Image (tube, rainbow, N blue to C red):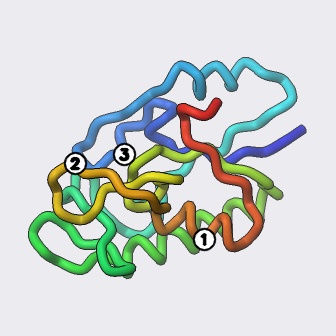
Amino acid sequence: MEYILVSACLLGARCRYDGAEKADDRVTALLDRKDVVLIPMCPEQLGGMATPREPSERRDGGVWNQKGEDVTWYYRRGAEEALKLARLYGCRCAILKERSPSCGCGQIYDGTFTRTLIPGDGITAELFREQGIRVYGESSL
């Protein structure tokens, strides 16, 4: 049995910054498999952020919301809590929401709030990679 951490929004939880969900058929199809157990989590909520919340993007090594407030602390705390879950369940991989400032893997928004993508990872994806946890975005399934 393999335990996999999954961004909760990809399973239909309304935890995104705008209070919406982003259920993904490729991810929810994994619920039918007998050889995997999906562990839903939202690093932003684990870090203490409310839902809904101001949109945020990575910039200068941190995370800033659209009002110009530095919210990096919440994102780092959420990433650390998500890592605790990964270790608790023995997760060796995670499926994370692409482009997110916490979960984005490979591409994230550039911090200008113009929907411009740049190469990079969200805070949680970055920490997972550093700790040897394989990270996949929903489109790579």
Give the camera-side residue of 116 and 19. 116
Residue tagged 1: 127
Q: Quadrant of residue 56?
A: bottom left
Q: Which mark is residue 15?
A: 3
Residue drawn at the location 15% of the way across and 52% of the way down: 114
Give the class, few, some or many, for how many residues have Cα within 10 Å of label 3's Cα (few <14, many ≥20): many
**Helix, strand or loop status at disc 1:** helix
Image location (x, y in percent) of residue 113 = 17, 57
Report the Cα–Cα distance between label 2 and label 3.
20 Å
Assign the C terminus to one quadrant of the image.
Answer: top right
- Of circles 1 and 2, which is in front? 2
Q: What is the distance, in whole Å, between disc 1 and disc 3 at their CAs? A: 21 Å
User: In the image, 113: left or right of 101?
Assistant: left
| Secondary structure of residue under mark 2 | loop
Mark pair 1, 2: CA separation: 24 Å
> In the rendered view, does 59 fall on the left or right side of 9?
left
